[in-house]
Image (cartoon, rainbow, N blue to C red):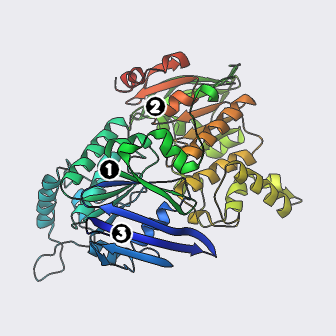
Amino acid sequence: MSSEYVIEMSHIDKQFGGVYALKDVSLLLKKGTVLALLGENGAGKSTLMKILTGVITKDGGTVKMNGEEINPRNYAEAQDMGIAYVPQELALVDYFTVAENIYLGREPYIKGTKLVDFRKMYADASELLEKLKIKLEPKTKVKDLSVSGQQMLVIARILSQDAEIIIMDEPTARLGYHEIDELLSYIQYLKENGKSIIYISHRLEEIFKIADEVTVLRDGCLIGTKPVSEMNEKRLIHMMVNRDVEFTDEFVQGHQRGEEILRVENLSRSELVKDVSFSLYRGEVLGFFGLVGAGRTETIRSMVGVDKKVSGDIYLNGKKVEFKNIRDSIAAGIMLVPEERRQQGLVLSLPIRENVTLGNLKKFSKFGLLQEKKEKAVVTECVDKMTLSRRSIEQQAGELSGGNQQKVVLAKLIAHDDIQIYIFDEPTRGIDVGAKSDIYRLISDFVKIGIPSIVISSEIPEIQALCDRVVIMSEGRVTAILNRDQLKDSNEILKYAIS
């Protein structure tokens, strides 16, 4: 192999409990290029990157950097070698400033003392951010940054350590349309300045915008590496899932709108939600769309009692209700699937089985005793419907990939049989294209048996594929409610989102 490759991973093997997570996988990264690493959830992408960054050890194969074999024993060693990782879940200290987060653990000290030299820290941070063309103020606290600002801060922290190779794991998962464009432009800037990037994403449109080559894994095996210029979306999807996947109008065909089941009038919550009104009918999927900070999630959280509303009325089946907390709304038959699955949707230390049944133990108990046989049968059926990749239902949720963790959250829904309304907040964030189709079909199937859904999404194609009507929000207010025949034009949707 020639020295044109800054990273050469050859014939990598890794087993967990006798089961191959990676088998004879090779990956080649050229200097100053973007290599897209694709595959379904559980395909082995994260395991391969953990080997490269020293988080786990390989069972076989070699890893070379600039032609020299390397074996980092931990992430700190990988960082010292110039390999950096931008995780999907950002690790920042909210109440520290931008500069404090950049130099966390590497703070400059006043000579001869153990006191942090804040003047030097802020000056260095300002110089670094200007050099990197990142528009952040060093003294701004992280909690006051937008999601995209936090993403750029993580990149600044990594580049402050002279990283040569940058691994980005779903970096746009939390971003809106304009922020995605800004980040992709910045990745192009990094490439032009000699940085080499491994880019993991389920959003294929991004791959065609920035990647030079694509490596596809499936079930822990290498399917192939191709120049992006030789690929199209259909070929990529087929390489990933070994079947054709289409996103068409089939998901909303057959929905018959019935009577009003939910009505929200003049809902307000400080500056985040301002006088929001909408209705949900049986037999429909109602979308909520808007740019980051539009107030979509805040509206729903206020409605179901997670956050306290200032004013507004809620009617369920024609009767006025008041949800003081999330338990009240669940008891009324409204189930919220949160965006933050790791913090709000799962207990990572518990097995899949317990996560699926934890909120519904009465269904699996008799005379106060858990019916384990019934529980295991139902859980197995639910996770099979979600095509969940796992060793067993006793595997800890924290060991699963992000996409498979989302499938556990959704499997919990199937295990419930007393729900009137499902609310999905970014249901396919970090989900591969095959699983995305399965989730769309699940939502459509709920509607067809009489259970309507609310879907909050930042992806216009998702809104177009799923929804019968869409509530569009901007700066906490409803700017439009569009019917399905008005959703074909993406620019029309965006027009109301930025108004």
Pointer 2 or 1: first along the chain:
1
Image coords of residue 351 (percent x, y): 67, 65
Image coords of residue 155 (percent x, y): 28, 57
Does residue 496 lie above or below 332 as drawn? Answer: above
Residue type at mark 2 is Ile
Q: Give the structural element (helix, strand or loop) at label 1.
A: loop
Name the residue tied to disc 2.
Answer: 460
Name the residue tied to disc 3.
Answer: 8
Mark 1 and mark 3: span between their CA atoms? Answer: 16 Å
Q: Give the structural element (helix, strand or loop) at label 3.
A: strand
Q: Give the structural element (helix, strand or loop) at label 2.
A: helix
Residue type at mark 3 is Glu
Judging depth in this view, the residue of 135 and 99 nearest the camera is 135
The quadrant of the rendering that contains the C terminus is top left
Pointer 3 or 2: first along the chain:
3
**Which residue does the image show at 70% across and 65% down from the upper left?**
392
